[in-house]
Amino acid sequence: MNRKLKFRLVAFLVSFIVLLIIFFPRYYIKKPDWEHLPLVRIRNTAAIGEALSNYQFDHNGRLPNQLSELVPKYILPANIRYFFWPLESKDFTNLSIEELSHEIDDNGAFVYLGKRGVEANMLLYQRTNLTTNLGITNFMVLTTNFTPAALSIEDVEARLHSLE
């Protein structure tokens, strides 16, 4: 094969691949299943982290005293599922603000440390009783730079112990 023919063949193949990518993206890009267990935990933690970051920006660097302070300005009532995992069958739409605050702060999926957790680089952590029966050995935490991280129970306990 001469050089000109090789060049045309390579150009044709590259063009063909580009056209496939442009016209058939669903065949090579798999969208994440946000209802899949690990992704739900990451999504919820990241959404709360973003809300905390926005709250902190609006309040001159201060973090809220409780997670429920993020609702409704930073997390809309329609998205309160971020605070609960696995999603309870309870209908949260009919609760008063006081009842909703109690559910988020006392019965939610996360224990909020707030400013107290800065020393341990952990603003909140997933309640450990939610995943032990599912065989999950890591727990979602939110670091002080509002990044979700999966840590072992031993690491979470060591960080909590350092706060005492």
Image (cartoon, grey):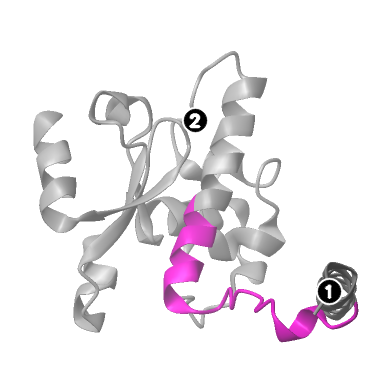
Left or right: 113, with 29 as reference point = left
The quarter of the picture where the C terminus appears is: top left
Mark number displayed over residue 2: 1
The percent position of residue 26, horizontal first and vertical second, equals 77, 83
In this rendered view, identify the residue nearer to me: 28 or 43. Answer: 28
Q: In this picture, which residue range is highlighted in magenta?
A: 23-45
* The furthest residue to the top: 60
Left or right: 15, with 142 as reference point = right
Residue at (32%, 25%) from the top-left corner? 118
Residue at (60%, 74%) from the top-left corner? 32
Q: Quadrant of residue 5?
A: bottom right
Mark number displayed over residue 158: none
Q: Which residue is identified by label 2? A: 64
Residue at (70%, 53%) from the top-left corner? 76
Name the secondary structure under disc 2. loop
Q: How packed is label 2: few (under 14 Cα within 10 Å), some, or many (20 or more)?
A: some
Left or right: 23, with 100 as reference point = right
